[in-house]
Image: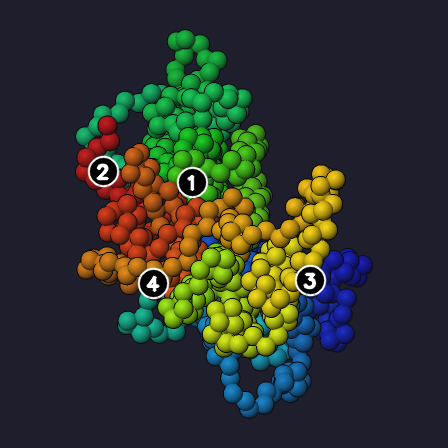
Amino acid sequence: MDVEQRQHLAATPGSDDRAALHHLPMRVQRLVADLRGLCDARLQPALLQGLDALDDNLYQQAERSRSHLDQQRCFDSRAMVRCHRAAFLRLVSEHVHASFERLGQSSEASDRLAVTPSLSLLDRHEHELSAALEQLASRGEAHTGPVLAELSYRMAVLVGAPPLEGDAMPASPHNLAMAVREAMPALDLPPEHQLMLVQVLERKLAPVLPALYEATNAHLLADGILPHLRAFAGARPANAPPAPPSMKAPAPASEPTQAAPAASHEPIAVLETLRDLLARQRAGEVHTASGPAATPGELEAALGALQRHLAQVTDRASRELRSAQRLREELLAHLNAGRPAGATRTGLSPEQDDTVELVARLFEQLGQQLHQGPGATALLGDLQVPILRVAMTDRSFFERAEHPARHLLGTLAEASHDWGDGKDIDPDLAAQLSRLVARAQREEPSAGLYTSLLADIRHHLSQLSRKAQVTERRQVEAMQGRERLHQARRRAAEVLAARFAESTPRGLLRALLDRAWSDVLALALLRHGEQSDAFAERLRITDQLLGRLPVEDSLGLRMTVEDHLQQIGMQAEEAEQVAQRLIGSDAGAAKPTEPAAAPAAAAAADMPALAAYAAAAEPPSATDLALRLKQRQRLGEQRGQESQPTIAPAPEPPLGPQEARIHNRLRQLPFGSWFEFIDPETGAASRRKLAWFSPLSGNSLFVNRRGQRVVEMNLRELAAAIASGRVRELVAPRDGLFDRALRALTGSLQRPTARA
């Protein structure tokens, strides 16, 4: 017996350190080890589901976010959760194990373990987190009060102590909240995501704790610990809600529990409601029985055969969404395959027939919600029979929002809808989803399979989102750079126009100022600002070139002009020629070259090649330089792009009342809002994301789901397009596509008109 007990304790996590329980009898040590293992078995999956739910919530929040920073924070938190989830689970488990090891210690010893915090101002996020943890503990204790009280007495008997309360109970909601609080730093989440974690853990632990306490009580009761103890719920206020089944007083062990049947029907409330609505809609229709109903085994075998058959057929017709009638016919054909001609044919029970009808209509609603091409519909068609198998065997498919198959179907539909471009699903994503759907067709349906497929889809979508985010950020940064350059050029043109009003330059000087020196001024504005010394120095040079200021050092001025022209991309030789033609001739810098002209001309009489070289070495004329300046590539322009003169914009016509209201709203929209553009010729709708707009000019950038630039337009143009109906703003739905399809299914069943 001792050997068995030691092996049992050694197999339990955290059972090596038993110094605090060595004074207790071996039977008590065994029971404590059993309870510790029972807690691990029930709590660890719930905590893991909570982390998975947090990952889902962060992904959905990133999808809905309109800020690059918020999206990045969500992705970073998802990475931290995936990387450190094992450490989080281990720390929670260690805290619970330590609580088991402290069983039987005096209250003074327990008090010494707690650290009294010093008085300080409480951060707002810290206050919200503390309130959420307190809510987790209080709600858990409220929902499990009688069962938890019964357990506190039984565990107190084990260690010879008064009834255990609060953190003295290892698996109590209060102690679990403390464990989550201590383990949370391992995830290194920002405050708002810590709050999300507590909220999802509360939802995941709510159905687990009553079952855990009941199982723990049953284990102690089976070992003879307080067999006649009964807990009774106290008097409830008249306006209080009815107690959940877990709060009712436990019945004697020899009597069947009355709450169990009600609880067993609770998960299928939605399915029964849908069946009732379907029956009402079918009222008056005549249905003839087609023979004895198929057994669950026969139905599963027929569905499996149908699924394998469809997985081998690759024609387009086999991948279409099937109507309820077609599903029935194919299913009945496989049910009765191989039977003699005169044999009684097997049919479907009313419940089986209703499930086929509901699944077919659900997929029909999903197909109507997609608004994509045949590729997305084909993916849904490939999943129709596997999902039907799940719905036939697991009645909670219609009820549980976290059902793996239901979650997979919703995620696949969302991916097909969101990553399409109005015509069909993204090709790369379609290939990945097709591989995953093919796996769902080949393998037998199970929770593990759909959980694995769901994780693969989310991983691929996460990679696509990151790539799109990087691409979009590059497009936004590029447009912001172009916008800043445009504003700088506009300001430089205004500065030059003010000086031209006093003295109008001509010829080469005008071409230089318009086509090159304006870029020098714009570059100084971009790099240093209008109030900088660098911009003031370039304005002083401008005034010297225009003759508004005297030139004290012509050579220094020429070198400075050459340097500034080279900074905007002009070749050194061309910059030298322009500066020398403008400044050097006036200062006499070119005079030393005049005496050499005669010898060169004399030598040309005998040497034609030398004459051609001398002619080519002559500096170009002012006309040639002016022509080159007009043809040169401006700062920030692409090669081959025709440059437009930077002039002051003409006054814009006033907007109409409706357009003005729309324009004011557009200027207040956050980046990341989605719009739908309607093709006037075909009527096709394409979704575009408002990635950025300039508050100064109103120029806006629209990208597609992959972050690629699609269109640039002014907010005034956008307001006019919205007013005319060519563009409409999309409002983010509050729920997912699957939930909308299920709601549409319910609405269609509530209509009195029967389905044809």
Earlier-in-chain disc, 3 versus 2: 2
Which amino acid type corresponds to the residue marked 4 in the rendered image? Arg
Q: Residues within 10 Å of mark 4 (few under 14, many from 20)?
A: some
Q: Give the quadrant of the N terminus.
A: bottom right
Q: What element carries label 1?
A: loop
Q: Which of marks 1 and 2 is nearer the N terminus?
A: 2
- Residue at 37% from the left image edge and 42% from the top image edge: 686
The C terminus - image quarter: top left
Q: Which amino acid does label 1 sit on?
A: Asp
For label 4, the residue is 667
Question: Which residue in the protein does label 3 denote?
Answer: 592
Image spot of residue 628 (x, y percent): 53, 50
Q: Residue at x 56, y 41 (%)?
A: 453
Q: Which of marks 4 and 2 is in front?
A: 4
Q: What residue type is labelled 2?
A: Arg
Residue at far bottom of view = 119
Q: Nearer the viewer, residue 603 or 62?
A: 603
- Depicted 14 relative to depicted 552: above or below: above
In front here: 615 or 416? 615
Q: Distance between the residues labelled 1 and 2?
A: 40 Å
**Judging from the image, what secondary structure is the residue with disc 2 in?**
helix
Point out residue 185 in the picture as x, y percentages from the top left corner: 62, 70
Q: Distance between the residues labelled 4 and 2?
A: 51 Å
What residue did someone put label 2 on? 280
Q: Residues within 10 Å of mark 2 (few under 14, many from 20)?
A: some
Q: In this view, does 142 lie to the left or right of 434?
A: left
In the picture, measured across the screen, residue 602 lies left or right of residue 662, that is right
